[in-house]
Image (cartoon, rainbow, N blue to C red):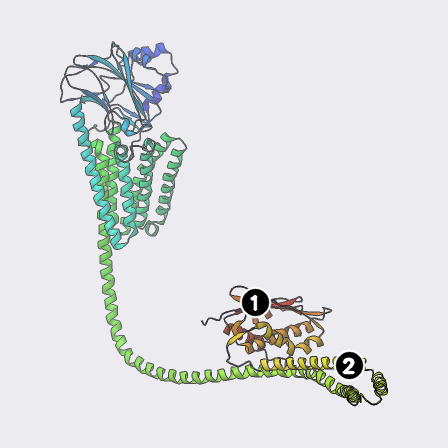
Amino acid sequence: MILLFKLDLSDQIAHFMKYISIAFLLLFLTTTKCVVANPVITFNHPSKKIQLDNNNTYLIADPNHSFTINQILADTFRTIYSEDMPNLGLSNNIYWAKFNLTNSTSQKLILKFNQPLLNNITLYRIDHKDTSQTTFSEKNPFIERQYYYATYAFDLNVNTEDTITYVLKFNSNEPIIFDVKIADADVIAKAELQEEIITGIYIGILFVMIFYNLFIYFTIRDRSYLIYVCYIIFIGLAQISVPGYGFKYLWPDFPAFNDLSIILFASIASIFGVEFLKIFLKTKQHTPLFNKYLLGFEAVFVSILIIYFTGNNILAFLILQLATFLLCIFIIITAIRIIYIGYRPAIFFLIAWIVLLLSGCIFIAKDFGLLPYNFLTIHIMQIGSGIEVIFLSFALADKINILKKEKETSQALALEALLQNELIIRNQNTLLENKVEERTKELKEINNELSVTISDLKQTQSQLISSEKMASLGHLTAGIAHEINNPINFVISNVKPLKKDIEDIYELIRKYENLDPINDLQNKIAEINSFRNQINYKYLKNEIGSLLKEIEDRAGKTADIVHGLTAYSKVDENDFKRADIIEVLNSSLTLLNQEITGAEIELIRNFSPLPQIECFPGKLNQVFMNIINNSIHAIKENTGHKKGQIIITTTYDNYKIHLSIKDNGIGMTEETKGKIFKPFFSTKEIGKGAGLGMSIAFSIITEHNGNIQLLSEYGKGSECIISLPINYTSK
C-alpha cells in the first residue's frame, strides 16, 4: 500500500504570515485574487452534483486553532489554492470553508465530505433567523452519524429559493483533499452504492485469493502460502480502512481503533510482505546483504507503531509513507537482482510490485495535482493492490510447477540410480545369502555356547555365594566356638558343686523321711536341725537356684547361636514367606556378637516394631551379616576414635520398611563409593575378602524390589539405608 506523502504548504504560509502586519496582509491579499463578497452557489438541477472548490468557497487555514465562527463570518479573505479541488496535505491545522447556497429546486440537499478519516467536522448553518451547528467526531461510534455512509454527510436544511450561509470546520491526522459535494439525497445514495460495489469487488478478489492460497497451504504445507495469506488479510484491512468501510462494517463501536487502523494494518501488512519476500525469493540464500536490509525495514515498521502510541500520529504517518515507498523500490531492486541470478519465481514477483509501485505513483501524482482527480486515480490503489495480489498468487502457483519439475527431475535421476543399483543388488544377493547362511550357522553355534556359558555362570554365581557364605562362616567360627564354649565350660565346672548340693538336700530329705513319730522324736529333730545347720540349708537353696538360672541362661545363649547359624545356613532356600525382619536382624547380631564385643564396639538398637514383610529371610540374614561385618571392619580401621559405635534404626511407612545401619568407622571416598557394589571390589587386604559381600547384598535387595543407599564421608563413618516393600510385587 502506498499512502499520500506531501508537505503542507498552507502550514508554511501561515507561519510566514504571522510575522507581518494585518495592514500589509490585507494589501497583499487584495493584490492576489482576494474577493470582497462570497459568491453564491445556486443549485438548480436535481440530478447533478455541485463540487465545492476554490472558485465558490472561501477556504481558510487556522494553524494556531484560534479562529472563531464570528471571525470567519466577518472576514472576506481566503487562502488561495491553485487546484480546483485543493490538496490540504498532512498538518495539525484546522480548516474553515465558507460558502453561500441557494436552492432553486424542491429537492432535499445533502453535503457530503469525501474524507472518511477526519478527526472532527462541524457544519454551521447561518440564516437571518438563527445559527445552528452539527458536529461529528471520529471519537463517536459510527451509529451516531446522521447518514450510514463511510464518509461524513449533513442535511443542509435549505428550502426552495432560500439562500443560506454555511461554514465547515474540520481537521485530520491524515492527509486531506477538499472533496466536498452537494447533491440530492438520491444522487448521493447512488454514488455511495457505486463506491461500495467497487470496494466489494476488491474484497471479493482478496477473499478468492485467501481461500485459494489457504487451500494450497493445507495441501502442501508450505509456510510461504500462510505468510502470503496474512499479507493479503492485512493489506485488505488497510485498503478498506482508508475509504472508511472498516469503521462502518467491522469496528463501528470502537472509534478509537479507527484512527489507529491505517497505520496498524499497513505496518503489519508491510512486515508480512517482507517476510513473504524473504521466504519466497530465498533472500538469505540468494542475496544475504539484501536480507539484512529487509530486517531493517521490519524494525522500521515496528518503530512506526511505537511512535504512534507515543502520541506522534503525524510523524508516524509520514515515516510510514516514506518507508512504504522506499520498501517498494527496494523490493523491485531485490527481485531484479534475484532474476539476474536465475531464480524464475522472481519474475512474477517483480511484475506484481511494479504494478503496485506504479499505482502508488499515480495515487501520489493525483494528490500533487499532476493527474486529474477522477474515478481511476481515486481507486488506483485498490486496483493496483488487487492486481498485485493476483500476480503474487500466480508466482506461488508457478512455484508449484517449478517444484513439480524439480521433483520429476529428481525422480528420474533416482529411478536411473535405482536401475543401476538393481543390477548391483542382484549380483550381491547370492553372495549375501551365502554369507547370511554361514553367519547364521556361526550364530547358532555361538548361541549354544552362550547358553552353556550362562548355565555355568549361574552355577558359578551359586558357588560364589556359597563360597562367600563359607568364608564368612570360617571367619566367624572362632568367635562362635568361643561363644558356645563359655556356657558349656560353665555348665561342666558347676555340675559337681550342684551335684554335691543336691546330695546334701537329698540327705536332709532322707533324715526327714526316717523320722519315727513314736520313738524319741525330739532327739531326731534336734539331730536333723543340727545337720541342716551344718550344710547351711538356706545358702544351699540360693546357690542351687543361682546355678540353675546361670545354666539356663548359658543354654539359651547357646540356643540363640545355634538358631543364628541355622538361619544363616538357609541363604539359598527358596522359601518365600512373611517374616519379622527384627528377628532376622537379631540372629545376625547374635552370630557377630563376639566380633562386636571383641572390638569393644557399642551397639545401639533403635528398634521400633515393624510389620512382617514378604521375603527370603535367609538371604536377608546374609545381607545384614555382610553390612554389619563391613561396619566392624571400618571401625577397626578408624584408629582416631576412642570407642567404636554401630547404630541400627528401624522405621516403616504405608508401603515400605526402612533399616539404617550407621557406624563411626573410617568411611569411604567418592571413588570407593562408586565401586562398592561391583563384584570382586574390596577395601580389605588381599586374602581377607573376596569382594563379593556388598555385590551379593545389592543383588538380594534388588531381588526383593527394594533399594539400598550408601551415605559415607571419609574419616567420619558410613550409613547404609535399606528399604524393602511390605508386600512384594513381581516386576
Q: Nearer the viewer, residue 723 or 552?
A: 552
Q: Which of 96 and 256 is in front in this view?
A: 256
The residue labelled by disc 1 is: 658
In the displayed structure, would residue 702 be above or below residue 265?
below
Image coordinates for residue 429, horizontal then vertical, percent = 28, 78
Q: Earlier in the sequence, mark 2 or mark 1?
A: 2
Question: Secondary structure beneath disc 1?
Answer: strand
Q: Is residue 640 left or right of residue 449?
A: right
Q: In this view, does 692 lie to the left or right of 400?
A: right
In the displayed structure, would residue 590 be above or below residue 231?
below
Q: In which quarter of the image is residue 190?
A: top left
Is residue 601 among the parts visible in the rendering?
yes
| Residue shown at 54% from the left, 71% from the top | 612
Q: For the residue carrying disc 2, how many other residues have a C-alpha within 10 Å: few (<14), some (14-19), or many (20+)?
A: few
Q: Quadrant of residue 378?
A: top left
In the displayed structure, would residue 166 be above or below residue 324?
above
The residue labelled by disc 2 is: 541
Question: Secondary structure beneath disc 2?
Answer: helix
Q: Is residue 420 left or right of residue 624?
A: left
Image coordinates for residue 714, horizontal then vertical, percent = 65, 67
Q: For the residue carrying disc 1, how many other residues have a C-alpha within 10 Å: few (<14), some (14-19), or many (20+)?
A: some
Query: Residues under labels 2 and 1: Cα distance?
Result: 49 Å
In the picture, the disc for residue 330 is none
| Residue shown at 50% from the left, 74% from the top | 703
Under mark 2, the amino acid is Lys
| Residue shown at 35% from the left, 44% from the top | 294
Viewport quadrant of the C terminus: bottom left
Under mark 1, the amino acid is His
The mark lying in front, picked from 2 and 1, is: 2
